[in-house]
């Protein structure tokens, strides 16, 4: 299964008064990684529309950290897919996500089959 | 079980180009619900007080969220929050966000308390534990 890697620098606007990355900002960072995954696979004019998101927070991310989002996607059948993502800082895993999504056209939001080029190694 | 409720509305800042409320905003509304539940449960000590006095901050350990329908610009939203389980270092919270009589999302959230310097888990402070246990269960 192909692994897609997206690099991101934690900005001040990603952090909160606790001095760490605000938990919902990982959702946005992971979404950027999924978007770049589609671009890298050559899938154009489509979005991955999430239906379920599970996220486990392992370690806090900090301002100015460079993180890598590692993403893999598998076809779950009937137009649905599961994207597994880890957000990593060096050897530390900051968060793990499992996202159930449907590939849809944008705009229009019509469901599409998952193209093979997205999931193949 | 005591269900704590807050309401709000979908603003432009909550929406994306699909015309729907974004995942981030749905997560943020849930956080507002949890924070206000805590504020009601223990009005004499805020999370800021806890950080300043004891050096303890609350963090989220995990969230499972299922989206069931979409919220759109101008919709009124209702965030319902309830305490499911209080343990020594963490607690489990259930949440439901509704809009126009439809459930938008359901949440299962695990929250914990950590030392703000070391970022290591600490037992839930007694006053917070009692307040959280009093939230229903």
Image: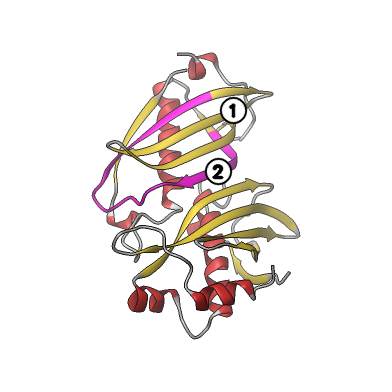
Q: Nearer the viewer, residue B92 or A88?
A: B92
Q: Residue at x 42, y 63 (%)?
A: B122
Q: Residue at x 65, y 52 (%)?
A: B105
Q: Element type at marker 2?
A: strand
Q: Nearer the viewer, residue B113 or A108?
A: B113
Q: Element type at marker 1?
A: strand
* Magenta stretch contains residue B18: no
**Residue B30 locus on image (x, y percent):** 56, 60
How far apart are labels 2 and 1 at the CA level?
14 Å
Q: In the image, which is nearer the foreground, mark 2 or mark 1?
A: 2
Q: Is residue B106 left or right of residue B19?
A: right
Which residue reaches farthest bottom?
A: B44
**Residue A9 locus on image (x, y percent):** 27, 44
Q: Over which residues does the magenta segment extend?
A: A48-73
The residue that mark 1 highlights is A81
**Residue A45 locus on image (x, y percent):** 50, 28
- Evaluate whether label 2 is on the same chain as label 1: yes
The residue that mark 2 highlights is A54
Give me the chain letter of mark 2: A
Res A102 visible = yes
Q: Residue at x 62, y 21 (%)?
A: A113
Vertical side of A1 occupied by B86: above or below: below
Contact? badges 2 and 1 (CB < 8 Å): no
């Amino acid at each position: 299964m192909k692994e897609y890697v997206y690099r991101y620098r934690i900005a001040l606007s990603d952090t909160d008064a606790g001095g760490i990355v605000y938990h919902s900002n990982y959702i946005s960072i992971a979404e950027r990684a999924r978007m770049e995954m589609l671009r890298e696979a050559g899938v154009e004019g489509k979005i991955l529309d999430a239906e379920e998101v599970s996220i486990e927070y392992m370690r806090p991310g900090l301002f100015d950290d460079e993180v890598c989002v590692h993403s893999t996607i598998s076809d779950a059948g009937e137009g649905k897919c599961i994207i597994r993502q880890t957000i990593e800082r060096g050897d530390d895993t900051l968060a793990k996500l499992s996202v159930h999504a449907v590939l849809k056209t944008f705009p229009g939001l019509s469901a599409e089959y998952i193209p093979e080029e997205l999931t193949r190694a | 079980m005591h269900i704590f409720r807050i309401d709000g509305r979908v603003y432009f800042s909550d929406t994306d180009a699909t015309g729907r409320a974004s995942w981030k905003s749905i997560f943020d509304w849930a956080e507002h619900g949890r924070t206000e539940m805590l504020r009601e449960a223990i009005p004499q000590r805020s999370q800021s007080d806890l950080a300043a006095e004891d050096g303890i901050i609350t963090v989220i350990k995990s969230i499972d969220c299922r989206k069931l329908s979409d919220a759109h610009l101008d919709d009124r939203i209702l965030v319902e929050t309830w305490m499911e389980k209080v343990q020594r270092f963490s607690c489990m919270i259930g949440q439901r966000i509704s809009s126009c009589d439809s459930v938008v999302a359901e949440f299962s959230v695990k929250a914990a308390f950590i030392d703000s310097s070391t970022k290591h888990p600490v037992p839930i402070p007694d006053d917070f534990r009692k307040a959280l246990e009093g939230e229903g269960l």
